[in-house]
Amino acid sequence: MHDEQGKAQFGSEDVDRLRIALARISRLVDRQVSGDGMTRTQLSVLATVAKLGPLGISELADIEGLNPTMLSRVLGKLEADGLVSRAASEADRRAMRVQTTPAGRSLHQRLRRQRSQLFAERLTGLSAEQASRLLAALPALETLAEQLSRPQPHRPQPAKAGR
């Protein structure tokens, strides 16, 4: 499971199992805590702005990995629903900043509480051994999440045959 430098080595089946389990958990939580009919992208943008805001539009686009057109649509919907507001930056009046409204902060906090409650209820169904293993895995999962949030260095694509 480790190479000569002590780095973890995972088989493709293990990688697939982990990826599928994490994605399934995410989808199931999204289904059970609906977010008042909001899309995953809308929920993610609202959460990012609630946690880190006020943010510049380009900074938010980078964090969320969205192109400016898509972000503009998402922010338009959130703004129309009264969850975020956009205003000119104090430092540069040409730049826009986005922040949550009181209604947006309230919705974000309510959804966080509901998601935490859902997890707490389901965690009580784990055996003591499973719970211990899950707690021991938290630092690794947090590190993986941090690594996934960083931009990857450009990797050249393989040349296509026949060109």
Image (cartoon, helix red, strand yellow):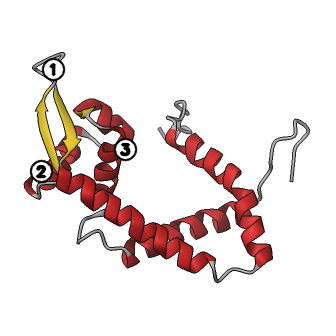
Q: Amino acid at mark 1?
A: Glu
* Point 34% across, 54% down: residue: 44
| Number of the front mark, 2 or 1 | 1
Q: In the current view of this chain or complex, which residue is farthest to the bottom?
A: 125
Q: Earlier in the sequence, mark 2 or mark 1?
A: 2
Indicate whether 52 appears above or below 144: above
Q: Residue at x 26, y 31 (%)?
A: 58
Residue behind mark 1: 90
Foreground residue, 56 or 50?
A: 50
Q: Which of the two residues, 155 or 74, is positioned nearer the viewer here?
A: 74
The local secondary structure at tag 3 comes to helix
| Secondary structure of the residue carrying numbered label 2 | helix
Q: First in sequence: mark 1 or mark 3?
A: 3
* Label 2 environment density (alpha carbons within 10 Å; few <14, some 14–19, many ≥20): some
Residue occupied by mark 2: 79
| Cα gap from disc 2 to disc 1, whole angstroms | 20 Å
Amino acid found under the numbered disc labelled 3: Lys
Q: Which mark is residue 51?
A: 3
Q: Is residue 114 above or below residue 86?
A: below
Q: Position of residue 105 (x, y in %)?
A: 26, 53
Q: Are marks 2 and 1 in contact (CB under 8 Å)?
A: no
Name which residue lies at 62% across and 49% down: 142
